[in-house]
Image: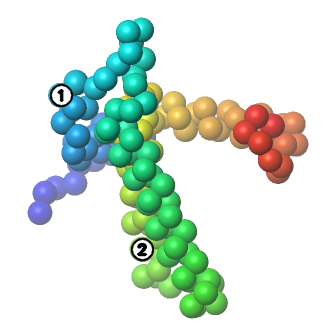
């Protein structure tokens, strides 16, 4: 078994996680860009990551649903472990999408906290819409 690399933060995680991407176009710097240098949304590696995120989020939800349905919402230690594994898969896809978009994962996290703080200060945590 390979020794697990030490990870000291989100950007370290993103860097280490990148070696598990199976799309050579990304690893080899052969991604498609428009004339003005913007990544093309049809890049197969990026598409695979966005679809993978949806699938892993769905698996997480499905495991939780079964805990509610079959176990009256009681999360056993093994259920917890399975949920944590799925969250790890979700994290990997988020990190890879961020990598494809050339944004450090720490920046994604920072921007999210800034958005949540703004909503909190304006008493807009609850509600609907992206730009509340």
Q: Position of residue 118 (x, y in %)?
A: 77, 34
Image position of 44 with respect to 80: above or below: above
Residue 31: x and y, percent? 28, 26
The answer to whether any part of residue 11 appears in the image is no
Residue sitting at the far front: 42
Local crowd size for mark 2, using a 10 Å CA cut-off: few (<14), some (14–19), many (≥20): some
* Screen quadrant of the C terminus: top right
Disc 2 versus disc 1: distance between alpha carbons?
Answer: 34 Å
Q: Write down the residue under mark 1.
A: 28
Tell me where residue 129 appears, x and y as whole percent: 77, 42
Q: Which residue is drawn at 68% across and 33% down?
A: 114
Q: Residue at x 34, y 32 (%)?
A: 43
Q: Name the residue under label 2.
A: 82
Tell me the number on the disc at residue 46. none
Quadrant of the rendered image containing residue 3: bottom left
Query: Could you tell me which residue is drawn at 64 percent across and 90 percent down?
Result: 72
Q: Residue 36 versus residue 90: which sits nearer the camera? A: 36
Q: How many labels does the image show?
A: 2
User: Relative to 94, does residue 4 appear above or below in the rendering?
Assistant: below
Q: Of 59 and 71, which appears nearest the observer?
A: 59
Tell whether 80 sits left or right of 85: right
Identify the residue shown where x is 25% and y is 32%. Answer: 26
Say what secondary structure mark 2 lies in.
helix
- Residue 96 position within the rendered picture, expressed as x and y whole percent measured from the top left: 37, 41
Which secondary structure lies at badge 1? loop
Mark closer to the chain start, 2 or 1: 1
Quadrant placement of the N terminus: bottom left
Frontmost of labels 2 and 1 is: 1
């Amino acid at each position: 078994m390979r020794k697990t690399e030490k990870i000291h933060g989100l950007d370290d995680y993103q860097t280490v996680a990148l070696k598990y991407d199976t799309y050579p176009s990304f690893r080899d710097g052969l991604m498609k860009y428009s004339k003005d240098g913007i990544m093309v949304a049809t890049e197969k590696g990026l598409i695979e990551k966005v679809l993978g995120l949806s699938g892993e989020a769905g698996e997480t939800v499905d495991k939780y649903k079964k805990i509610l349905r079959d176990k009256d919402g009681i999360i056993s230690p093994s259920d917890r472990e399975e949920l944590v594994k799925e969250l790890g898969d979700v994290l990997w896809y988020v990190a890879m999408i961020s990598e494809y978009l050339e944004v450090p994962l720490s920046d994604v996290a920072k921007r999210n906290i800034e958005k949540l703080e703004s909503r909190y200060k304006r008493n807009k945590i609850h509600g609907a819409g992206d730009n509340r």
